Image: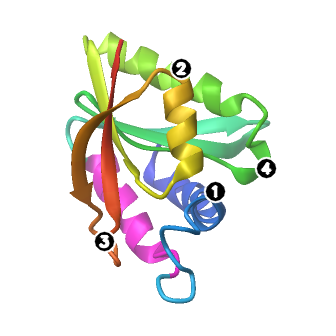
Amino acid sequence: MTAADVSAVVSVQEPGAVLGLADVFSQDEHPFPREAIAERWLREIDLPGTDCFVVGRDDAVAGFAATRGDELLHFGIAVEHWGTGLATLAHDDVLDHLRGGRVTQARLRVFTGNGRGRRFYEKHGWRPTGERSRSSFAPCPELLGYARHL
């Protein structure tokens, strides 16, 4: 991912977040923070040790991912590609990237209220660790830690 990709990535991320996180972030009270998310991507692209990726499909942005060390920081696929298998392919590529960095145990955090995301990760071998934290985005919902052996 480059800075030039950020607008397209956020345009893919927003509908998925609004739909997939409807039980976590009420759009009436806490609308998708488009500018803050774009700024975060721009910071992370330039952050040493953080790798940001675009998932492409038919010459268009169809998803995104980011890793730092042993952590899968961000992962998402465009709503129109949900259920097509693209998420599994992209997920497997991200895990290969982590393995290439000699990671043997990966981790991630997912919103407690993100049932779709939790089912996806559990289907792909991730297991809850019991670790809990809070998002920095209002209303600061709970995040659950997951881990997966690579």
Secondary structure category for the residue under label 3: loop
Query: CA gap, disc 1 to disc 3?
Result: 22 Å
Does 102 sit above or below residue 49?
above
Q: Earlier in the sequence, mark 2 or mark 4?
A: 4
In the rendered image, is residue 51 in sight?
no
Which residue is the extreme one toward the bottom? Answer: 28
Lateral position of residue 122 relative to residue 134, left or right: right
**Residue segment shown in magenta:** 31-46
Residue 144 % position (x, y)? 32, 47
The residue to which callout 1 is attached is 12
Residue 140, label in figure: 3
Q: Could you tell me which quadrant the C terminus lies in?
A: top left
Amino acid at pointer 4: Glu
Q: Earlier in the sequence, mark 1 or mark 4?
A: 1
Label 4 or label 3, whichever lies nearer to me, is 3
Amino acid at pointer 3: Cys
Q: Residues within 10 Å of mark 1 (few under 14, many from 20)?
A: many
Q: Is residue 40 magenta?
A: yes
> Badges 4 and 3: C-beta atoms under 8 Å apart?
no
The residue to which callout 2 is attached is 92
**Secondary structure mostly seen in the magenta stretch:** helix
In the rendered image, is residue 101 in sight?
yes
Label 1 or label 2, whichever lies nearer to me, is 2
Q: Residues within 10 Å of mark 3 (few under 14, many from 20)?
A: few
> Badges 1 and 3: C-beta atoms under 8 Å apart?
no
Q: Earlier in the sequence, mark 3 or mark 2?
A: 2
Residue 66, label in figure: none
Residue toward you, 17 or 10: 17
Amino acid at pointer 2: Asp
Which residue is the extreme one toward the front? Answer: 130
